[in-house]
Amino acid sequence: MILHQNVVGVDVAKDWIDICDLGSGRTRRIGTTRRALLAFAGKLSGVLVVFEASGGYERPLMAALEARGVAYARVNPRQAREFARATGRLAKTDRVDAKVLAEMGRALKLTPTPPIDPARRRLAELVARREDLVAAIIAETQRLAMAGDAFVRRDISRVLITLRARRLSLEKEIGAQLCASEELGRLDKRLRTAPGVGPAIAAILLARFPELGAIDRRAAASLAGLAPHACDSGYRKGKRRVWGGRADVRRALYLAAFIASRCDPEMKAFRKRLTDAGKPLKLALIAVARKLLIALNAMVRENRDYQRRPA
């Protein structure tokens, strides 16, 4: 494990970043132009930069750090806020957040986030755009069902035609991106040998779950938000619930589990055993999704296609 001499916390905003250097104790603010970020990254050596995932605003910072070969750790905002509360900080300002992130990196000995492959990064942007279009199509479809005026219905129908055409265009571009990358294309074909995993779900997994195959099954289930967490205290035994993780990955695997448990004999029998035992349908589908994820993780790790058990 690489030991970094110093930790720098960075709070990211749209137009600037606040920086806290634990080694010197200095805090400062700079703009988020490419030149300013590259100049900032160029002055760092033997440093781990810690910042939160900020809905995409952190991407220019990541690009500058990667260009200068600086290690960074991108952390979950909820974890950073809980760390701040644990250290007694209730106030929340940009400078306070930068200092909290730096202290979090030092206290927890955070490991650097692996740099994202450019092909996978572009795939992630394409997948995100497709999800935006799908959400817009669902919203317009619901409005069409409620609209009574003929003009409004025609207008919504025209918008839906445009949105569906753009979705088709995005799906073609996603396919082209997968074909352009030898690694992504190979993984896409491999994932799609599993039951319930089609082109859209495979693309989401490749874009949003780069750790697939590189971690154990428990870590994979936790990252996907499919691991049941205990809620016990004293004599009280609470219900295990799934929470946290990556919501988009969980939704994709849940959909794949629903399809697989209707079409694949093994998954169908597994779901039936659970429902026959009195488990709610949603809980059974979560269990199927977790089982499917474990299989996908093993497939990528062992470099093999899905293996169906003999009936």
Image (spheres, helix red, strand yellow):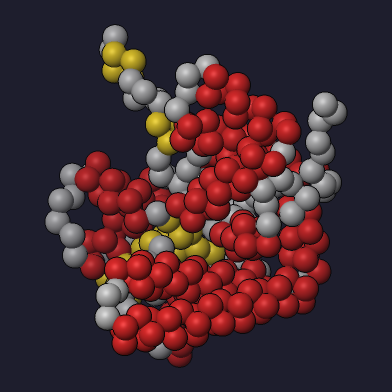
Residue 39 shows up from this direction:
no
Q: Residue furthest top?
A: 235
- Would you identify the image quadrant in which residue 165 lies? bottom right
Residue 200 shows up from this direction:
yes
Q: Position of residue 121 (x, y in %)?
A: 59, 71
Q: Position of residue 24 (x, y in %)?
A: 33, 65
In this picture, is 70 found above or below 297? below
Please tell me which residue is depicted at 33% across the width and 71% down the height of the picture. Answer: 143
Asked whether, in this view, residue 82 is left or right of residue 275, the answer is left
For the residue pair 127 and 1, the one nearer the viewer reads as 127
In this picture, is 100 found above or below 130? above
Q: Position of residue 57 (x, y in %)?
A: 39, 74
- Number of numbered discs present? 0
Please tell me which residue is depicted at 58% across the width and 39% down the height of the picture. Answer: 289
Please tell me which residue is depicted at 73% across the width and 33% down the height of the picture. Answer: 265
Asked whether, in this view, residue 78 is left or right of residue 123, the answer is left
In this picture, is 247 found above or below 293? below
Q: Residue furthest left?
A: 91
Quarter of the image for the C terminus: give it: top right
For the residue pair 96 and 22, the one nearer the viewer reads as 96
For the residue pair 187 and 15, the one nearer the viewer reads as 187
Q: Position of residue 242 (x, y in %)?
A: 43, 36
Please tell me which residue is depicted at 30% across the width and 46% down the height of the picture. Answer: 83
- Would you identify the image quadrant in which residue 221 lies? top right
